[in-house]
Image (cartoon, helix red, strand yellow):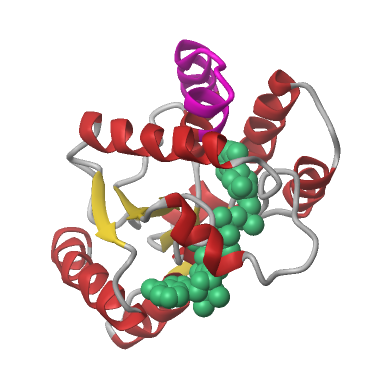
Amino acid sequence: MRESKKGAFITFEGTEGAGKTTQIERIKTFLEASGIDFITTREPGGTLLGEKIRSLLLQDEMAQMTELLLMFAARAEHIAKVILPAINSGKWVLCDRFTESSYAYQGYARGISLEAISTLESLVQGELRPDCTFWFDIPVLEGMKRVQSRGDKDRFEAENITFFEKVSAGFQTLAQERSNQFYRVDALQSKDDVTASILLHLKGLINRYAG
Ligand code: T5A
């Protein structure tokens, strides 16, 4: 059981265009009104070095193992400089993607062994795991439609539908295996209905971690 003075670690996962960033913005207003001290951040990124690594990851061609290791290099920096200091000072951390994306994209979709990812997870994170992961479940094509009007595609967005179907199936498997951690959100609903679904669960988390 986490000590009550520590902040909660909340992550948001899903395939492209599922609506994570939109909802994190909306949740901020609710948390402020609830008197919760929090930060928002994202992966890959979240630190100066991490954002540089993000640029490489989204633009430069690289081997699959390089991609995985860069994700975890950015994560190591993020955990040391941002996530743990915030949690240990009592702040909640809302993070747009985390290690579950490494399992889904580099593991289930690219085909890197899940054992290798699990080893990196233990090495880089120690005991740190999300207290709750909001999983934005959306048919891949619907998410893609939402983001297709954007300009140039990054290296991940340029992947084909088969790749994203594997990512999506990966999240589904993770959600089943980690049912205490994952909270499924029907991301096809309207923005307001998605927000309502998240807030319902978030109120329970506030009672648990900040009550
Ligand atoms: N990655 C990341 C890995 O491969 N391994 C890892 O370990 C990690 C951490 C990051 C990429 O890196 C990969 C995964 C990613 O491919 P990113 O730019 O951060 O790249 O990618 P996303 O997180 O997927 O960002 P997106 O912007 O594509 O998706 P969001 O944040 O889920 O969607 P959002 O909120 O920006 O919304 C997209 C559009 O849909 C609309 C919004 O207004 C917006 O126009 N929308 C809705 N429309 C209708 N109904 C709703 N309910 C809507 N909600 C949002």
Quadrant of the rendering where the C terminus is positioned: bottom left
- Report how many numbered discs are placed on residues in the image: 0
Q: Residue furthest right?
A: 60
Q: Report whether 158 appears left or right of 211.
A: right
Question: Can residue 157 be seen at all in this image of the molecule?
Answer: yes
- Residue at horizontal 27%, vertical 59%? 185
Q: Quadrant of residue 8?
A: bottom left
Instruction: Confirm whether the magenta stretch covers residue 109.
Output: yes
Q: Is residue 188 above or below residue 101?
A: below
- Residue at horizontal 62%, vertical 35%? 76
Q: Is residue 43 above or below residue 115?
A: below
- Residue at horizontal 47%, vertical 29%? 103
In the image, the segment drawn in magenta is: 105-123
Give the x, y percent position of residue 83.
52, 50
Question: Can residue 41 be seen at all in this image of the molecule?
Answer: no
Instruction: Give the dominant element type of the magenta stretch: helix, strand or loop.
Output: helix
Give the x, y percent position of residue 150.
70, 69
Nearest the viewer among 71 and 206 is: 71
Give the x, y percent position of residue 111.
55, 18
Instruction: Confirm whether the magenta stretch covers residue 80.
Output: no
Nearest the viewer among 22 and 70 is: 22
- Residue at horizontal 67%, vertical 72%? 149
Ligand 1 positioned in quadrant: bottom right
Nearest the viewer among 6 and 181 is: 181
Quadrant of the rendering where the N terminus is positioned: top left
